[in-house]
């Protein structure tokens, strides 16, 4: 349907944005990625994203966003801040991150003649990040169009999916194994299934277990017929 159009995926090399990359590749003639370097604890995250972009044959632009750390010290970038999720916003929260990332991605996209922006934000595993909400994305879409007088379309294929459904989407695109083995979600910087202990690993594993159980039930049901 959109085979003659160009898209830019906001790409971190994690499960969600890699699933979005596969989603975009199925829909658009040309896909590029943009990765933000904001002093993540693990340089491996940037390397991992670069490796996936290379393997999938898409161009990657890495933009320096180290100013984010200067403005908003947080547990993703500072090893002296513990990753904690309790009441209120988790310490991994970076104020305004998606607002900034999508705005920079839009400038880059317009520059290369792409009107489609794809981001892996979702409301379902909502940890209280206001700039992951659907209403924010819709509002930003209008703002970007007005700011640059350009018909951007922000796509959020994961907005209403929970983690198990995100695995399901990857599986539908025959990308489950790839996403499982090549992406980095773990806060401790371990690729694939990760450390198994941090909040990101627990969420990822719970989603995968849930989806695999569902898939097995379906295939067992299928054999019975
Ligand atoms: Zn982990």
Image (tube, grey):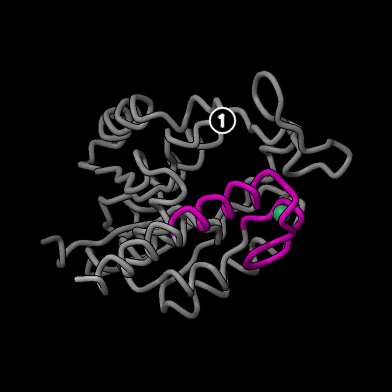
Q: Say which residue appears at 50% left-offset and 63% top-offset.
A: 61
Q: Is residue 114 found inside the magenta-colored segment of the image?
A: no
Q: Which residues are magenta?
A: 185-211
* Mark 1: C-beta under 8 Å from nearest atom of ligand 1: no
Q: Is residue 151 above or below residue 88?
A: below
Q: Residue furthest right?
A: 80
Residue at screen point 46% across, 44% down: 104
Where does residue 164 sit, x and y in percent of width and height?
A: 44, 51
Quadrant of the snapshot with the N terminus: bottom left
In the image, 43 versus 191, the foreground residue is: 191
> Of helix, strand and loop, which one carries label 1?
loop
Tell me if residue 41 comes above or below residue 94 in the rendering: below
Residue 185 x, y percent position in the rendering: 62, 56
Q: Which image quadrant for residue 171?
A: bottom left
User: Residue most toward the top?
Assistant: 88
Q: Where is residue 14 shown, x and y percent of the image?
A: 55, 58
Q: Quadrant of the C terminus?
A: bottom left
């Amino acid at each position: 349907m959109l085979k003659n159009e160009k898209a830019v995926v906001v790409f971190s090399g994690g499960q969600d944005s890699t699933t979005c990359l596969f989603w975009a590749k199925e829909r658009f003639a040309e896909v590029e990625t943009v990765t933000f370097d904001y002093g993540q604890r693990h340089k491996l995250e940037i390397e991992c994203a670069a490796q996936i972009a290379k393997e999938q044959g898409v161009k990657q632009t890495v933009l320096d966003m180290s100013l984010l750390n200067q403005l908003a010290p947080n547990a993703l970038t500072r090893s002296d801040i513990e990753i904690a999720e309790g009441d209120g916003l988790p310490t991994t929260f970076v104020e305004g991150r998606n607002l900034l990332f999508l705005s920079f991605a839009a400038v880059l996209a317009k520059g290369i003649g792409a009107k489609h922006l794809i981001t892996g934000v979702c409301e379902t595993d909502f940890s209280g990040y206001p700039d992951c909400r659907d209403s924010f994305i819709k509002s930003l879409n209008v703002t970007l169009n007005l700011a640059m007088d350009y018909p951007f379309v922000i796509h959020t294929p994961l907005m209403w999916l929970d983690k198990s459904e995100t695995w399901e989407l990857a599986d539908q695109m025959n990308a489950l194994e790839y996403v499982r083995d090549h992406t980095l979600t773990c806060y401790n910087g371990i690729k694939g299934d990760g450390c198994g202990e941090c909040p990101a690993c627990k969420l990822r594993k719970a989603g995968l277990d849930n989806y695999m159980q569902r898939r097995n039930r379906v295939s067992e049901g299928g054999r019975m017929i």
